[in-house]
Image (cartoon, helix red, strand yellow):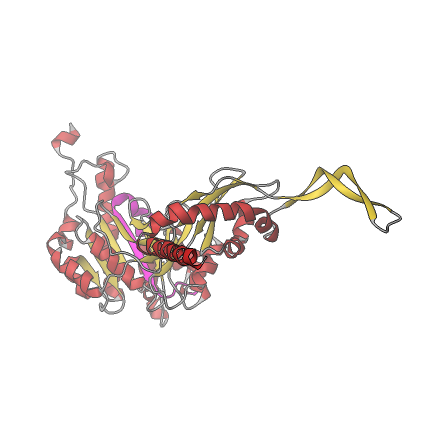
Amino acid sequence: MSDQLWPMLGVLAAVVAGLWAWRRFHYRSFWLVVGFPITAITVRATWRKVALGCGLTKKRQRFWFTTVPGLVSSTGVVRVRRKFQRVAVDTKPWMWLPMPTRHGWRVTLHTLEGQIPADYADVAERLAHSWGVHAVRVSSDKPGRVRLAATMRDPLVTVDQLPASTELLKVTVGRLETGGPWVVDFKTVPHWLNAGATQSGKSNLANALIVGLAPQPVALVGFDLKGGVEFTPYAPRLSALATSRAECGGLLDDLVALMTDRMGVCRMAAARNIWQLPPTMRPVPVVVLVDELAELYLMADKSEKDEIAKTSTALLRVAQLGRAFGIYLFCCGQRIGSDLGPGVTALRAQCSGRICHRVNDPETATMTLGDLDPAALDSARAIPAQTPGVAIVASQDGQWYRARSFYVSEAAAEHAAHAYAGLAPAWADVMAAQPQELPDSQTA
């Protein structure tokens, strides 16, 4: 017997070591071949108990055979008989077969009467703990259907390097919690609001944007209210840089004038935006990077009231009308609150792209994400300080995600600014590049 035991133990140890090595060095194939089938069976087998524990079941009347106590026999044993009658049973939502994903699995459920996707979103954390997964996200693509997407482990622990941008005004700045790319696409979402405390990853995201936009034929404009310490190293790639409120006011006046000129060009060409213009007439897109947005609205005394009102109005005009004329905003700030005045609230309404890193006060998170989804607000407040770069992002598909930006050092962003300095158009050339009349081929 002992002669057979040792070979069996050796084979078992070899199998365990092989499975460990397989999972360690090629997790994706291990997950598809071994991990997912076991997980799918477990999810289907435990769904009734999990649904009951999470309050997702409904009481329904069913005809069922029940045992009814009868008389006590002479031996003292209670005799029972089965009776076919209607009883109330807990009915679980119908679950389709789980399907594997890159970082977990997804499954579609048929909701019961009176249920909505919010009922499942409210118990998403309970579902995650019940199945032992990192997180469960809830979505719905049609009435009566709810899709649960489970993530086995956090894909934001480590992120890749910043990839090169291949499309105009589109930069992949990080990774979403689903494992997909986090893309900032100014053509789709023209204006962005980026909030975050010190050391939360807010500046790193701006560095990623500069590295991604530097090789593209766009004009970059900087508003650095820290006295220029943030954007001055990138000045070779910037077409204009303002480092004080007075300079910001003058540069905003230039942007409003530029926008007005481009309105005239589009009107002459019967175009609704610059992208409908012929390539020979199309002006260069302008991306405006604003750092420390709150400094534009802070007022020390009443003598600054008129200056702040003028600056706020000009920035709001650019946000309202700039998209069609190739002017895009990316506004960053440590604190964005309603106490800064109605100008900030109006600007926020124009910024459909929302990014909230770790913040120090609930008001900033509420101003950034509060009108989108209460669950997103709770997730933003739960970002730990040990995970810089993690943020809550309102995506262009109408949903919100946890995301993390690629790490881009100041040295890398400065190198990109110097390497592509020749692509930076002079601000005077940008302002003077608007044709006053159509070419003959267009007027004919």
Q: Is residue 133 left or right of residue 173?
A: right
For the record, the magenta segment spans 316-339
- Residue 290 shows up from this direction: no
Q: Position of residue 22 (x, y in %)?
A: 33, 53
Count every numbered label the image shows and give the total: 0
Foreground residue among 124 and 316:
124
317 drawn magenta: yes
Residue at position x 44%, y 67% from top?
A: 361
- Residue 247 shows up from this direction: yes
Q: Position of residue 342 (x, y in %)?
A: 42, 59
**Extreme bottom residue here?**
300
Q: Position of residue 83 (x, y in %)?
A: 78, 38
Foreground residue among 29 and 219:
29
Q: Quadrant of the C terminus?
A: top left
Q: Quadrant of residue 205?
A: bottom left
Q: Is residue 50 left or right of residue 315?
A: right
315 drawn magenta: no
Q: Is residue 371 left or right of residue 439?
A: right
Residue at position x 22%, y 35% from top?
A: 269
Q: Is residue 69 left or right of residue 314?
A: right
Foreground residue among 321 and 275:
275
Residue at position x 19%, y 52% from top?
A: 219
Q: Position of residue 123 (x, y in %)?
A: 54, 53
**Extreme left residue here?**
422
**Extreme right residue here?**
74
